[in-house]
Amino acid sequence: MELEGGKLTTKNTQEKVVTASGDDKLENIFKEIKTNKNSTVISYGASWCSVCNQIMPAFNKLSSKFPKLSFVYADIDECPETTQHVRYTPTFHFYRDGERVDEMIGAGEERLHDRLWLHS
């Protein structure tokens, strides 16, 4: 998925994860979440974080199992202004009806699956 004309769109049905490649793009994603009230999960990580690198394949795989959720990945080093609130990586934020409703800190594919199921 990617942001096109203010909408999250799927380019490849296997790949559902939008990458926020900068503060501007992440700000646009936040606006999209609030405007369209999409159920969304944002994974905050960093390229240097080994735990983040371990959970990312599962995050990508799970994105195809939960079609009602939008999946976003934001690297804290690429989005320094909009990710100042993130203290640990990986951190997952869950949004429903335009509002953040849950947070999960740390990894664990089963934990992540359960949270995604809860919010889908």
Image (cartoon, grey):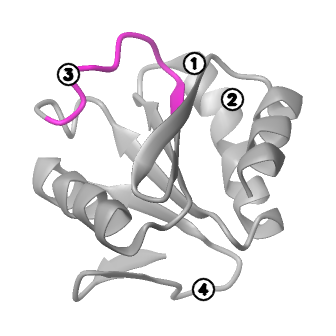
Q: Nearer the viewer, mark 4 or mark 1?
A: 4
Q: Quadrant of residue 52?
A: top right
Q: Which residue is mark 3?
A: 84
Image x and y of residue 99, in percent: 41, 47
SS at badge 1: helix
Q: Which residue is mark 1?
A: 50
- Left or right: where 76 falls relative to 37: left
39 in relation to 112, above or below: below
Label pair 1/2, CB-CB below 8 angstroms: yes
Other residues around mark 3 within 10 Å, as few (<14) / some (14–19) / many (≥20): few
Image x and y of residue 78, in percent: 21, 39
Q: Which residue is mark 2?
A: 54
10 in relation to 84, above or below: below
Point out the stretch of residues depicted in magenta.
82-92
44 in relation to 60, above or below: above
Q: Earlier in the sequence, mark 4 or mark 2?
A: 4
Q: Return the residue nearer the eye: 57 or 7.
A: 7
